[in-house]
């Protein structure tokens, strides 16, 4: 065995030689490699290494004495694979070096390649190639191996079959290596010099026919054929024809410095070598001969005659032996579209392009002189080179390269033959239009024809002007001639030049004449005509029409004649294909061209078809689609058929952009595209449920037949792909038709689930089909339901009423839950990465687009909880079978792909959000673990980086869309995925790394770590790399710190960041750790506050960039303000964040409190001028701008609708669309019928409309204005607006306060917020929309309105946020006192916000115009409502901390505030009717605003000092009293409606008549009012009684409203009846009867239930004689409150009403003595409520079982007052109930006995804790009375029996003082009752004993002692300004007087000392009450 049999240096580059030398220098004991060495011709070391490496991969193989055949074959394959890896690696390195990209890898490869070249790489490659050629040739004997050859030696045990198998493998490997080595040399010599010796060496190999012989083409050996082409191309490239062409263009000298073969000697050597090829050159040699001939001819031009070589011989040999055919074959093999992924294809194309340009330029080739065969080869070659090459095509049209100048000349020559010889021009233009810009250039080139070429007979009327050769004759047309059926295309008198027939045409004519001679009768005339622009397109359509006519005639013939006409069919298809392809490309690039072509009419030569005489592009496409599918039976036609059909559908898609309805009506009715539902008679209506199954069963028989018969056989589904593109365009156009619905059903039910099983010639097509099908599903899911607008009548009903519902239903019906979806998944990330490494072109790009389309589809599916397709979520995460990942895993893995740009990554993140929402339904799912598993081991750091890095702020602008997607993912994680929260937020640089690493004791963290870890790795698994300490937490903190900058530059980014932070605060325990980390950052809240406007600005309005621009600004100004909405949204989120944290951490202490959000808000609230919050309130409450813009939108829409209709009626192209169903124009036409029926005919009406539209008079009284108004009445403009409404924008959710809508994506503020102008343009037609001025104006207005409305919605959110912040800052017990300036500022803001909408409502104008989703009026009123609520908050704090209301003097600021507020309220009350009737007004909003206004006025009037006191001449006070008097009427009128504001209005009236107006002022107003207060109260009472009787059928709010109105009415009546005149008025209105009915209901068991709390039998003695309450429904379980408190420890409204009723009755009885009716009703009420009255007088037990309560003491006081008032009706009382009076006296006496218990010597203990929340709050306040004796001490101790808070530390609370006050008031009223009814008794009766009806004198003396004890403390301070002390003082004086009277009545006289003390106490208290001495 010789070691020279294999030389590694011939194959491997020098770096591998070291390893080889090391191995060969070491001795090895080779045992089993002798057989392998003989077989593969390897030396001992090589065989040993190969064998050991093979054994390492095949450990289960046992090698015996000899290798088996299978083992030898496997070893050979392994050896061949290693050789291939080595060669391919070198080729990849050369590709990197020659590439355009600069990178570190390219630099490293460049350095190594330089070293390898110096080490002899070139020689090694050439030697290896030559050795391969010699060993591969069949003429070379295989006995002696050559250097570098792959030789299989004959092993004795292998046998003949084994030798044959190994020889075949060797041959295949040799062919593959041959191609690879040739490609390496092509790359090597691409930009490097080549010596002539090397070129001759390579040429010698070709001359000796080694390539041809070694690779004789066989049917199954494609590599050999490729090697032939590569060998030719290697020699062609190394001739460097590009440089030569450049020299010729520059007229430079050909020298050795200018060109590698510039030396004459070198050229002579090459010429000599190539002359030896003349004798029978091979196919690989002829292109080289042709190239050298062109080289020599061009060199002779610039060599100055130094050494002119003869090129003719080379050219002749090349021409005779088919050089052009060989070049065309090479182009087909190396440059076809299927080789676009080949990285060397561009090199092949540039080489062939330079060669062809050289040949054409050197020999002056012209299509007019070339034979047909050669012309065909050149055209084919040019098409192969330019097809699909965007850069090459654009370079050609840009005319930057002089190398292509000969080609441009060839193109000009081809245009000179058009249309007589259309093939060359159309084929060239078709190939040269591979990009959009190139197609535009091709269209312009075709449109600018210099003339037309036409074939003529000399016998025709031609006048030859110049005699001579036929090529130089000038001619004039004596008559006009038609061209392609176009009459008079060549007019009479036209001039032209006569040319001989081109060989191609002559050959064609000879063939047509069956070999006859055509002679000189036929000539070609090039007519020079002033061609109109677009003449080329008309001729192009005529050519199409002519060939379609031929096909129609053939197909109408009997079927038996079709086979005979096959040649004619092929010829027609050959002529038809280039124009159709060119039309498809031009119209796809320029949609406007499609519209223009439709306007062009060509004559129809189709006879008997019923077609019109003139046809356009739409009818031509329909004609083509009707005839071409009929040719599928002829197998030779399959390829051109598919190509033409693809172009037809591409043309249809281009037409559908602007004319979708016509495409559906004319093109889609062709048999190929007609759905089965249209073929059969469809029912006129289908219900949704039955129609859905039918929907997915749709079929398109013609297309399905084509798929099975043609596409499936060829593996090319180009027609199906074009069909999907057409459906996408139709879906985007917004057209609705049964045909389109059937298409969608066909795609969803057939193509989507079946296309993965199709066999494709190229996988890129599969992914394109996948992407298009999923796009259709996405568009269908986002399609709105059929609009309820008039439509053109059609015989066919809609297949389904709602396409989106039908598609969702279909997706849920598949097997396994979602077979229609999950079988059509894209490749996962690993497959995409493999594609990107293996393929660099179409397949990788198509797969990436399919994956991207899936990411767009996921959010629209709706897989989250409660979503329409939530049922599919389980199948999304289900593994279909073992080893196959789940659909969710495939989709989630795409996050790790490296091809993503910013927009693509945003879509992927939104897809991950959708998966997370779908996974929210899965129990115990770790989404972070799922992502780690889906993306693969070791990919988690990359995945985490892709998720969190978008939140990192860069120095430049951040992609807001990507930032929003990442923030949304965080929000979704915070909603339902704790593991994902941990992944996104930790580890963070904000946390202590040591603390992060330390184990934590909290179970939550442990669970988080387990979730993050995912499944535990197996033994030996690699550990996950440490995650970088940067997270979303860091990104959010960066955004907040840069808040000021982002707010100015990128407010959308800031808004998304703050929204995500707000979600963290709202997430609670799930994000508590992250929240604490952020709160620990210094300056957090200062940074958040920095996101707000500067407080120093004190701006009352928004900035110009935000909102304030006035109504006069044009729409285009508004379009530039979309950032304003995001800025306001960011401010709203910042305020919400501050409020939320301040509310949650209000009780913070220490340093945390100093830097907390609460301290920040509190500091703002304590600012004397209101601080930042009130500045923001004024900023956000500015009047809503843009009213004129909104009002003008409807006008713009009506004008656009009018112009659309008028234009369409007068336009031959748009006109047919009016009659078609499903289109926007069709619906608009149907709406406009009343307008069109006005004239004598529709044509007259159309002319009148057109005149009005084109008229310059657009005034209010013009005809144009009249038609626009009528169009508005018909709803035309509204139809356009509805067609443009955005379906994905949920404005209600966007305007919700708080985080309720955070599950949904954030609103897309900006131009498309309300209307999608692009959608409307698509539905109208982009070109038509661009041409119509009114439509352009409407689209601009829509965009401006979107900005305006989004800004307004964001402003409303900010206003709610600032209201919440103010509420939090003023909600604490230690909240600051607000000054009058703050209140005045809020009142002013309310006035600014409310008065503009009031004024507009009064005018009756429409504030929102045509915007249905937004109301200017509602927005303005909403702002006013928010400000009114803030005013209520402010007044509550002002009233609670302001000056005492009883001070007697009101400052001027108070008067001003009340006056302004009263003016606002009066304006509201007078204009509320107009607002309620205004369009767009929200009644609920009006109610809220009215309630807040009235509540604010009530608070202000309660805060105001009484106007009845003070200086009478004070003008502001007098003016305010006048205003109050004027407001009483509207306030009372408001009560008539008994709505929500009625109760507050009554309360205001009560305050006014009680504190601010004298009876002489208000009583006449009450008498003049048209409102009966008794009726108002009675109506409300009946509502309460009815609800109580019939259960809770009514809403709770209605019950509460009616109950409140009853209570307020009673309060007002109680205040009014204090004056006799009012009492008389109300008595006349039926007050007593109403009170009687109310009292009877209140005490009834089935009514108010107060009477049910009384037992009929008294309890036993020893219990205080108290009657115990029964188990009333209103009473709680536990302590007995006698029905005064509910189960929720709230005062029962019925009990409160009862108290007012008792007081009213007592006052009326006293005020109206002698009124018989009043007295009778009073006695009747006494009879009805006796038991309840007696219960009220019973002394309480004051124990835990029956505690002493404030409510019952108040009832005791009112009951005693009522009974005392009834004293003068004793006769009637006793007649009605004889035993009642003694019982009442006895009960009152027992109550006084209870009241007298505490004395100076003896105290008592009672149980009287606060019950209601208000009482408990009162118990925490200090007492307002300076008293601490008697019952004040007892109640103070009793109220502290239950420890309920900090107020327990008070000795005397305000609650205990109120309790004692009520008790003493009750004592005074009980004494008054007893004094009034006490009979006169004699001494005998006294001596015997008066009984229990009389209080004991001793107990009365105890009361006197209590009063005297309290008189000292109550008189220590002045009574001025202390109404409570004065009232208590008067009560004590009354008690002293009445106790002495009762004692005297019983004959008891106190001792003189006590009497003296009583007199001193009376004098002391009288003096305190009347300091001036007036003791009246």
Image (cartoon, grey):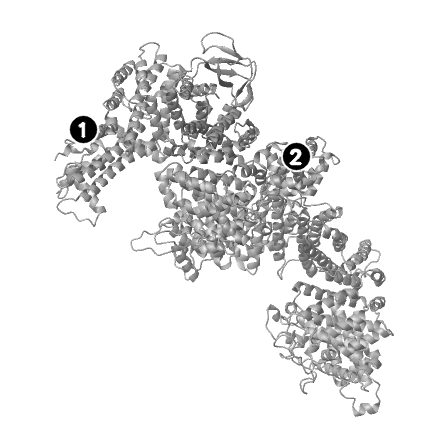
**Disc 1 residue crowd, few under 14, some 14–19, many 20+, Cα 10 Å:** few
> Looking at this rendering, what residue extends furthest in the top direction?
467
Count of numbered circles on the image: 2
In which quarter of the view is residue 206 placed? top left
Q: Residue 569 at x, y = what percent?
A: 43, 29
The reply to whether callout 2 and callout 1 are in contact (CB within 8 Å) is no
Is residue 1430 visible in the rendered image? The answer is yes
Labels 2 and 1: the sequence-earlier one: 1
Q: Is residue 139 left or right of residue 619?
A: left
Q: Viewer-proximal residue, 592 or 752?
A: 752
Residue 1106 shows in the view: no
The x and y percentages for residue 3 are: 14, 34
Q: Is residue 253 left or right of residue 1252?
A: left
Give the residue number, with chain letter if any, for mark 1: 140
Which residue reaches farthest right?
1714
- Find residue 432 and report its horizontal and vertical position in percent: 44, 27
**Which image quarter holds the C terminus?**
bottom right
| Label 1 residue SS | loop
The answer to whether residue 1378 is above or below residue 481 is: below
Which residue is identified by label 2?
A: 1206
Q: Nearer the viewer, residue 1370 or 1115?
A: 1115
| Viewer-closest of 1427 and 530 | 530
Residue 998 image point, x, y percent: 39, 57
Quick one: 1495 or 1156, which is closer to the camera? 1495
Q: Nearer the viewer, mark 2 or mark 1?
A: 2
Q: What mark, if any, has residue 1661 been given in the picture? A: none
Q: Residues within 10 Å of mark 2 (few under 14, many from 20)?
A: many
Q: What distance separates the C-alpha of mark 2 from that of mark 1?
A: 84 Å
**Quick one: SS at disc 2?**
helix
* The N terminus - image quarter: top left
């Amino acid at each position: 065995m010789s070691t020279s049999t294999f030389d590694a240096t011939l194959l491997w580059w020098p770096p591998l030689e070291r390893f080889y030398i090391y191995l060969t220098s070491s001795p090895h004991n080779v045992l089993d490699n002798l057989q392998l060495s003989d077989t593969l011709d390897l030396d001992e070391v090589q065989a040993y290494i190969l064998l050991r490496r093979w054994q390492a991969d095949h450990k289960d193989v046992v090698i015996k004495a000899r290798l088996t055949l299978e083992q030898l074959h496997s070893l050979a394959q392994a050896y061949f694979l290693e050789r291939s890896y080595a060669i391919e690696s070198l080729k990849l390195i050369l590709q990197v070096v020659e590439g355009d990209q600069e990178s570190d890898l390219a630099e490293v490869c460049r350095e190594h390649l330089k070293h390898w070249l110096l080490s002899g790489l070139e020689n090694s490659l050439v030697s290896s190639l030559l050795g391969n050629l010699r060993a591969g040739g069949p003429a070379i004997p295989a006995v002696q191996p050559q250097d570098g050859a792959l030789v299989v030696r004959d092993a004795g045990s292998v046998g003949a079959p084994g030798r044959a198998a190994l020889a075949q493998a060797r041959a295949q490997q040799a062919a593959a290596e041959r191609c690879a080595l040739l490609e390496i040399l092509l790359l090597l010599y691409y930009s490097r010099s080549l010596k002539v010796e090397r070129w001759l060496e390579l040429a010698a190999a070709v001359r000796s026919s080694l390539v041809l012989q070694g690779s004789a083409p066989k049917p199954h050996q494609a590599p050999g054929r490729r090697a032939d082409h590569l060998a030719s191309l290697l020699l062609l490239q190394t001739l460097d024809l590009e440089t030569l062409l450049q020299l010729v263009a520059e007229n430079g000298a050909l020298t050795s410095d200018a060109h590698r073969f510039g030396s004459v000697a070198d050229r002579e050597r090459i010429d000599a070598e190539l002359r030896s090829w003349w004798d029978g050159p091979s196919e690989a040699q002829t292109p080289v001969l042709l190239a050298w001939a062109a080289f020599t001819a061009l060199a002779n031009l610039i060599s100055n005659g130094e050494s002119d070589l003869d090129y003719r011989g080379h050219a002749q040999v090349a021409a005779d032996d088919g050089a052009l055919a060989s070049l065309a074959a090479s182009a087909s093999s190396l440059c076809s579209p299927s080789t676009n992924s080949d990285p060397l294809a561009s090199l092949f194309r540039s080489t062939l392009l330079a060669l062809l340009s050289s040949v054409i330029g050197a020999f002056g080739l012209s299509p007019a002189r070339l034979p047909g065969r050669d012309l065909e080869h050149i055209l084919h070659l040019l098409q192969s080179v330019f097809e699909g090459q965007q850069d090459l095509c654009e370079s050609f049209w840009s005319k930057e390269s002089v190398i292509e100048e000969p080609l441009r000349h060839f193109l000009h020559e081809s245009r000179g033959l058009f249309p007589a010889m259309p093939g060359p021009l159309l084929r060239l233009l078709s190939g040269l239009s591979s990009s959009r810009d190139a197609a535009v250039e091709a269209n312009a080139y075709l449109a600018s024809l210099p003339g037309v070429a036409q074939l003529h007979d000399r016998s025709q009327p031609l006048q030859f002007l110049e005699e001579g050769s036929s090529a130089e004759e000038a001619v004039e047309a004596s008559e006009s001639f038609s061209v392609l059926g176009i009459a008079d295309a060549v007019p009479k008198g036209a001039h032209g030049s006569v040319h001989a027939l081109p060989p191609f045409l002559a050959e064609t004519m000879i063939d047509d004449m069956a070999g006859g001679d055509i002679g000189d009768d036929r000539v070609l005339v090039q007519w020079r005509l002033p061609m109109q622009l677009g003449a080329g397109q008309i001729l192009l359509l005529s050519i199409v029409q002519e060939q379609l006519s031929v096909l129609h005639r053939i197909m109408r013939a009997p079927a038996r004649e079709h086979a005979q006409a096959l040649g004619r069919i092929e010829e027609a298809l050959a002529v038809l294909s280039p124009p159709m392809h060119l039309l498809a490309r031009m119209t796809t690039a320029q949609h406007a061209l499609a519209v223009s072509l439709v306007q062009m009419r060509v004559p129809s030569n189709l006879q008997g078809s019923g077609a019109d005489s003139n046809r356009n592009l739409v009818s031509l496409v329909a004609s083509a689609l009707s005839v071409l599918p009929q040719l599928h039976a002829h197998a030779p036609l399959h390829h051109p058929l598919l190509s033409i059909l693809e172009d037809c559908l591409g043309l249809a898609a281009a037409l559908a952009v602007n004319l979708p309805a016509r495409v559906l009506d004319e093109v889609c009715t062709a048999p190929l595209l007609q759905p089965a539902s249209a073929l059969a008679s469809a029912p006129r209506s289908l219900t949704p449920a039955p129609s859905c199954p039918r929907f997915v069963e749709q079929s398109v028989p013609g297309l399905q037949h084509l798929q099975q018969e043609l596409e499936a056989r060829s593996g090319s589904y180009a027609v199906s792909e074009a069909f999907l593109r057409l459906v996408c365009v139709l879906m985007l156009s917004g057209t609705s038709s049964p045909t389109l619905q059937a298409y969608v059903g066909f795609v969803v039910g057939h193509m989507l689930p079946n296309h993965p099983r199709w066999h494709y010639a190229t996988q890129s097509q599969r992914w394109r089909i996948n992407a298009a099908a999923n796009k259709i599903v996405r568009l269908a899911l986002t399609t709105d339901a059929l609009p309820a607008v008039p439509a053109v009548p059609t015989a066919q009903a809609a297949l389904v009423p709602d396409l989106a519902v039908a598609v969702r239903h279909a997706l849920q019906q598949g097997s396994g839950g979602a077979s229609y979806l999950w079988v059509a998944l894209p490749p996962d990330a690993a497959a995409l990465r493999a594609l990107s490494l293996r393929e660099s072109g179409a397949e990788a790009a198509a797969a990436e687009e399919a994956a991207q389309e899936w990411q767009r589809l996921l959010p629209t599916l709706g897989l989250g909880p409660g979503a329409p397709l939530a049922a599919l979520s389980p199948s999304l995460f289900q593994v279909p079978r073992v080893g196959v990942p789940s659909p969710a895993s495939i989709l989630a893995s795409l996050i790790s792909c490296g091809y993503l740009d910013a927009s693509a990554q945003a879509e992927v993140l939104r897809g991950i959000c959708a998966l997370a929402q779908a996974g929210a339904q899965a129990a115990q799912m770790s989404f972070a673990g799922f992502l780690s598993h889906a993306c693969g081991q070791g990919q988690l750091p990359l995945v985490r980086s892709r998720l969190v890095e978008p939140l990192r702020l860069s120095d430049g602008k951040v992609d807001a869309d990507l930032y929003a997607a990442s923030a949304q993912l965080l929000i979704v994680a915070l909603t339902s995925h704790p593991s994902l929260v941990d992944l996104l937020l930790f580890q963070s640089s904000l946390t202590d790394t040591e603390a992060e690493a330390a184990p934590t004791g909290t179970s939550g963290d442990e669970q988080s770590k387990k979730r993050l870890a995912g499944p535990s790795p197996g033994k030996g698994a690699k550990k996950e790399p440490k995650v970088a300490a940067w997270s979303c937490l860091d990104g959010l903190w960066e955004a907040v710190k840069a808040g000021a900058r982002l707010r100015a530059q990128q407010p959308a980014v800031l808004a998304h960041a703050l929204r995500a932070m707000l979600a963290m605060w709202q997430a609670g325990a799930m994000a508590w750790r992250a929240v604490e980390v952020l709160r620990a950052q210094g300056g957090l809240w200062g940074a958040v506050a920095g996101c707000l406007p500067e407080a120093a600005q004190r701006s009352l309005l928004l900035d110009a960039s935000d909102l304030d621009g006035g109504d006069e600004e044009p729409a285009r100004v508004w379009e530039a303000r979309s950032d304003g909405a995001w800025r306001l949204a960011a401010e709203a989120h910042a305020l919400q964040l501050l409020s939320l944290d301040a509310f949650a951490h209000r009780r913070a202490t220490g340093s945390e409190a100093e830097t907390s959000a609460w301290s920040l808000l509190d500091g703002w609230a304590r600012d004397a001028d209101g601080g930042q919050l009130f500045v923001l309130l004024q900023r956000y409450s500015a009047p809503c701008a843009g009213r004129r813009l909104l009002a003008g939108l409807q006008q713009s829409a009506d004008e656009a609708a009018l112009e659309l209709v008028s234009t369409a009626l007068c336009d031959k192209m748009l006109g047919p669309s009016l009659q078609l169903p499903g289109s926007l124009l069709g619906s608009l036409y149907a709406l406009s019928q009343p307008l069109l029926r006005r004239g004598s005919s529709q044509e007259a009406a159309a002319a009148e409309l057109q005149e009005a539209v084109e008229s310059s008079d657009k005034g209010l009284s013009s005809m144009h204005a009249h038609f626009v108004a009528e169009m508005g009445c018909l709803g035309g403009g509204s139809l356009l607006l509805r067609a443009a409404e955005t379906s994905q924008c949920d404005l209600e959710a966007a305007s919700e306060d708080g985080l309720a809508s955070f599950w949904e994506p954030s609103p897309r503020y900006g131009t498309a917020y309300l209307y999608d102008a692009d959608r409307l343009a698509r539905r109208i037609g982009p070109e038509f929309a661009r041409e119509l001025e009114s439509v352009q104006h409407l689209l601009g207005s829509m965009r401006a309105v979107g900005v305006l409305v989004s800004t307004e919605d964001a402003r409303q959110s900010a206003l709610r946020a600032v209201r919440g912040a103010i509420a939090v800052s003023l909600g604490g017990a230690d909240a600051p006192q607000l000054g009058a300036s703050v209140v005045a500022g809020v009142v002013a803001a309310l006035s600014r916000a409310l008065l503009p909408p009031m004024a507009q409502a009064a005018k009756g104008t429409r504030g929102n115009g045509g915007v249905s989703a937004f109301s200017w009026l509602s927005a303005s009123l909403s702002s006013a409502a928010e400000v009114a609520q803030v005013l209520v908050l402010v007044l509550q704090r002002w009233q609670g901390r302001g000056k005492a209301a009883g001070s007697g003097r009101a400052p001027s600021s108070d008067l001003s505030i009340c006056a302004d507020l009263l003016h606002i309220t009066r304006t509201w009350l007078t204009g509320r009717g107009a607002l309620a009737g205004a369009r767009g007004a929200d009644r609920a909003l009006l109610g809220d605003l009215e309630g807040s206004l009235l509540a604010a006025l009530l608070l202000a009037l309660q805060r105001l000092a009484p106007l009845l006191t003070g200086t009478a001449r004070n003008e502001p006070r007098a003016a305010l009293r006048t205003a109050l008097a004027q407001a009483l009427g509207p306030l009372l009128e408001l009560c008539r409606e008994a709505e929500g504001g009625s109760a507050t209005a009554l309360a205001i009236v009560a305050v006014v008549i009680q504190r601010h107006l004298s009876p002489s002022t208000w009583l006449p107003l009450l008498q003049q009012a048209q409102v009966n207060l008794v009726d108002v109260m009675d109506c409300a009472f009946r509502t309460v009684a009815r609800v109580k009787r019939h259960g809770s059928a009514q809403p709770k709010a209605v019950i509460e409203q009616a109950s409140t109105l009853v209570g307020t009415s009673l309060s007002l009546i109680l205040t009014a009846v204090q004056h006799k005149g009012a009492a008389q008025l109300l008595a006349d209105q039926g007050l007593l009867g109403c009170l009687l009915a109310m009292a009877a209901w209140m005490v009834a068991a089935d009514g108010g239930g107060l009477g049910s709390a009384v037992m009929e039998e008294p309890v036993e003695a020893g219990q205080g004689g108290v009657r115990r309450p029964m188990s009333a429904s209103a009473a709680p379980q536990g302590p007995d409150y006698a029905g005064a408190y509910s189960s929720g420890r709230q005062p029962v409204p019925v009990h409160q009403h009862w108290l007012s009723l008792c007081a009213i009755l007592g006052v009326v009885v006293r005020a109206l003595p002698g009124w018989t009716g009043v007295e009778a009703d009073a006695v009747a009420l006494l009879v009805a409520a006796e038991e309840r009255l007696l219960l009220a007088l019973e002394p309480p037990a004051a124990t835990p079982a029956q505690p002493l309560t404030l409510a019952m003491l108040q009832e005791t006081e009112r009951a005693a007052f009522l009974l005392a008032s009834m004293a003068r009706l004793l006769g009637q009382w006793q007649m009605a109930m004889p035993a009642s009076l003694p019982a009442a006296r006895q009960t009152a006496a027992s109550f006084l006995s209870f009241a007298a218990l505490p004395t100076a010597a003896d105290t008592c203990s009672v149980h009287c804790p606060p019950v209601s929340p208000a009482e408990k709050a009162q118990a925490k306040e200090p007492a307002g009375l300076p008293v601490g004796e008697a019952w004040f001490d007892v109640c103070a101790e009793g109220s502290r029996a239950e420890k309920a808070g900090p107020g327990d530390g008070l000795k005397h609370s305000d609650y205990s003082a109120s309790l004692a006050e009520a008790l003493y008031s009750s004592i005074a009223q009980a004494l008054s009752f007893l004094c009034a009814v006490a009979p006169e008794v004699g001494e005998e009766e006294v001596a015997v004993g008066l009984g229990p009806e009389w209080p004991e004198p001793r107990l009365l003396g105890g009361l006197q002692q209590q009063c005297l004890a309290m008189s000292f403390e109550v008189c220590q301070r002045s009574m001025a300004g202390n109404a409570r002390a004065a009232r208590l003082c008067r009560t004590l004086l009354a008690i002293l007087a009445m106790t002495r009277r009762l004692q005297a009545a019983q004959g008891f006289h106190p001792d003189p000392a006590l009497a003296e003390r009583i007199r001193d106490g009376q004098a002391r208290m009288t003096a305190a009450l009347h300091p001036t001495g007036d003791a009246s």
